[in-house]
Image: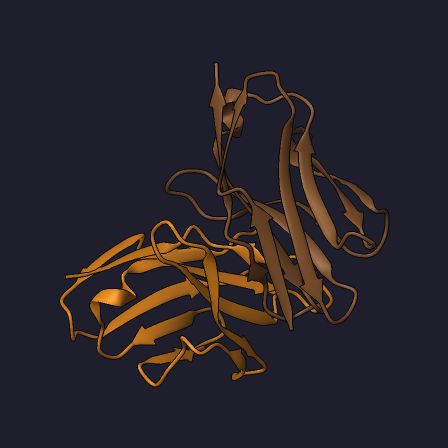
Amino acid sequence: AQSVTQLGSHVSVSEGALVLLRCNYSSSVPPYLFWYVQYPNQGLQLLLKYTSAATLVKGINGFEAEFKKSETSFHLTKPSAHMSDAAEYFCAVRLAAGNKLTFGGGTRVLVKP
Amino acid sequence: EPEVTQTPSHQVTQMGQEVILRCVPISNHLYFYWYRQILGQKVEFLVSFYNNEISEKSEIFDDQFSVERPDGSNFTLKIRSTKLEDSAMYFCASTDWGDTEAFFGQGTRLTVV
């Protein structure tokens, strides 16, 4: 079984400030981990994924995430927020290729000018 | 770039009516999924489909739901007798063999009145 917890349902950051979105998971086997972004009234777009290669993963739009097995975490960061980063972000875990994704509750990011 | 397409983008239906949501997964993919997202809530897994049969389903996916791959390209979700609580965004997704990431469609917003 697997589960995902995202700390903070809403995060507000100033433009140019660091974005940090927290994700912790539980999994019975080494997981595959993902971050998806959802812009208003749109579908889910993959930001980045961890698949047991490098623990620091770089994604699109300047985002990156670090897999820390000891902390069972996969936090998402971006050094400098842009107005276009305003969206909802979902962390997700999958146990194996082909298996279902289990999503966290999502974090809505608001970027202030 | 290949993409998952869903139709319709919006569907309004009367309670008790049957609805069919349609999806065209990426053509060489082998695993197909339906997820739903009730407004303001997280994305929830409904069902996965592989080799022309259901491989896994959640508790949400009760006898009112069914899936079908009627031909080589379409993947449908049928809700036999819709309830108010079926109102949600429904996402179709697909993956290839060995792929770890799921590709999502833009979703169908279902409103049951």
Question: In which quadrant is the N terminus of chain A drawn?
Answer: bottom right
Q: Is residue B70 visible?
A: no
Q: Residue at x 67, y 52 (%)?
A: A24
In the rendered picture of this protein, how many numbered marks are placed on residues?
Answer: 0
Q: Say left or right for B51 vs A38.
A: right
Q: Say left or right for B92 vs B7.
A: right
Q: Is residue B71 above or below residue A46?
A: below
User: In terms of image quadrants, where is residue B85?
Assistant: bottom left
Q: What chain is colored orange? A: B
Display colour scheme: by chain
Q: Residue at x 48, y 14 (%)?
A: A113
Q: Say left or right for A71 vs B13.
A: right
- Depth check, front residue: B111 or A55: A55
Q: Is residue B56 above or below residue A49?
A: below
User: In terms of image quadrants, where is residue B18?
Assistant: bottom left
Q: Residue at x 59, y 68 (%)?
A: A100
The x, y position of residue A52, in whole percent, is 83, 56
The colour one sees for chain A in the rendered image is brown
Q: Is residue A99 above or below residue B107?
A: below
- Depth check, front residue: B59 or B50: B59
The x, y position of residue B109, in whole percent, is 31, 54
Q: Is residue B54 visible?
A: yes
Q: Say left or right for A46 vs B109.
A: right
